[in-house]
Amino acid sequence: MTSGLSPLSSRIPTFRQSLQSRSYVVEAARFGPRGVDAYRRYEKEADALLSRYGYHVERVLEPDSVSGFPFTPDVVKVAYFEEADGMQKAHADPAHHAIESELYPAAVQQSVWVLGRVRP
């Protein structure tokens, strides 16, 4: 299934920044019954909020195959926050609650999230 997704947040900084300061987020998601349109709505709202805190989507993948996952994801997204505390700041924003409690559950049936940093 081709989702047609591409990074909404393709504004990767042109300046060179230390990879060690970034906080990476990998999302593997299976769309809910409303499909890619609901995911796009979530993505648009989330990107507008998260980008205020240094969030950038680096890659969006459409998996050809998976192994060891409890489901087959429609999309795998690799993103990062410029600073390690970017995600905490985004979560503290009052607008984040609606994204996490309403838009994401309406868009996604299952997901797995991996958070981490680049190790030297």
Image (cartoon, grey):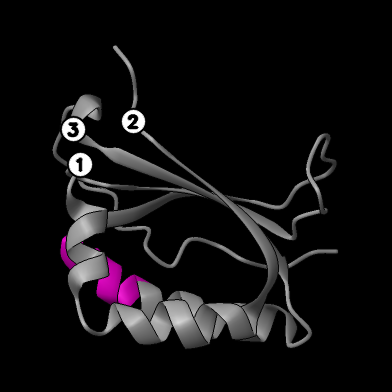
Q: Position of residue 97 (x, y in %)?
A: 34, 81
- Identify which residue is drawn at 71% across, 52% down: 62
Q: Which mark is residue 109?
A: none
Q: Position of residue 51 (x, y in %)?
A: 25, 65
- Foreground mark, 3 or 1, reads 1
**Residue for badge 1:** 84
Measured in 3D between alpha carbons, the distance from the residue under mark 3 to the one under mark 1, in whole angstroms, is: 6 Å
Measured in 3D between alpha carbons, the distance from the residue under mark 2 to the one under mark 3, in whole angstroms, is: 8 Å
Left or right of 114 on screen, residue 50: left
Helix, strand or loop under label 2: loop
Q: Are marks 1 and 2 in contact (CB under 8 Å)?
A: yes
* Quadrant position of residue 35: bottom right
Amino acid type, callout 1:
Ala
Query: Quadrant of the image for the C terminus?
Result: top left
Whether residue 24 appears in this view of the structure is: yes
Q: Which mark is residue 117?
A: 2
**Residue for badge 3:** 21
Q: Which residues are magenta?
A: 47-53
Q: Are marks 3 and 1 in contact (CB under 8 Å)?
A: yes
Binning the other alpha carbons within 10 Å of mark 2 as few (below 14), some (14 to 19) or many (20 upward) gives some
Amino acid type, callout 2:
Arg
Report the magenta stretch's main SS: helix
Amino acid type, callout 3:
Ser
- Identify which residue is drawn at 32% across, 54% down: 56
Q: Position of residue 10 (x, y in %)?
A: 37, 58
